[in-house]
Image (cartoon, rainbow, N blue to C red):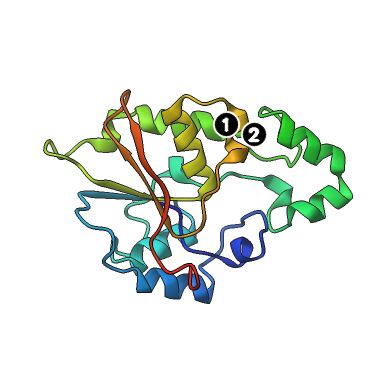
Amino acid sequence: MSHASTAATAASAFAADEPLEPRGAAAAADARGTVARVTALRCSPAAAAVETAAALGLGPGDTSTTADALRDWDLGRWRGRTLDDVAGTDPAAVTEWLSDPAAAPHGGEPLVGVLARVADLLADPALVAGDDRAPHVVLVTHAAVVRAAVLSVLGAPPQGFWRIDVAPLTSTVLRGAPGRWTLRTLAHPLASPARG
């Protein structure tokens, strides 16, 4: 699932590691109890993911359940800026970034890096280990990581990344196990759109 909104998501800016903004925190608290049958929890180490898990009643609100593979896309020096702002100062860099999945003009992680990291996570048997019945592993992460997971499951090309919309505080359900994942639901809201 994607974490609740932060100041960056509310401003349509590239994310920085920041806490939930007040409306996002309230929406996550309102959605407490909507995620059932959790057998394991893994969170991005980012404050927004850990706070979302805690507000939903899924975790202790600390870093004991964090997984580095769930970290947000590192957009380097673009963090905290909007796409329009970056395009206004360096349109060639934005064009390169949007058209070449291996490009990283921001100095951070290229899209192909995010896609590979998430594909490796989904291929890891440890992701669903520990419950032989039907594990319900909840991953609290970022929209970019959810989008990368969807591409991996569908076997879609990197260009499809830009065609998937994942709002804050939404649930995407994958069923199966490494090597045989299927997409069940995409970006289902956990809270009222007016609050989330």
Q: Amino acid at mark 2?
A: Pro
Label 1 is placed on what type of residue? Gly
Which residue is at the front of the view, 70 or 186? 186
Side of 11 where 49 appears, left or right: left
Query: Where is mark 2, residue-wise?
Result: 110
Question: At which x and y percent is residue 167?
Answer: 52, 55
Distance Cα–Cα, label 2 vs label 1: 5 Å
Q: Vertical placement of 43 versus 8: above or below?
A: above
Classify residue 154 as left or right of residue 6. Answer: left
Percent from the top left, x then y, of residue 11? 66, 64
Between 170 and 18, which is closer to the camera in this rendering? Answer: 170
- Which residue of the protein is positioned furthest toward the left in this rendering? 133
In the displayed structure, does residue 99 sit left or right of residue 57?
right
Count of number-bearing discs: 2
- In the rendered image, which residue does mark 1 sit on? 113
Classed neighbour count for the residue bearing mark 1: other residues with Cα under 10 Å, few (<14), some (14–19), many (≥20): some
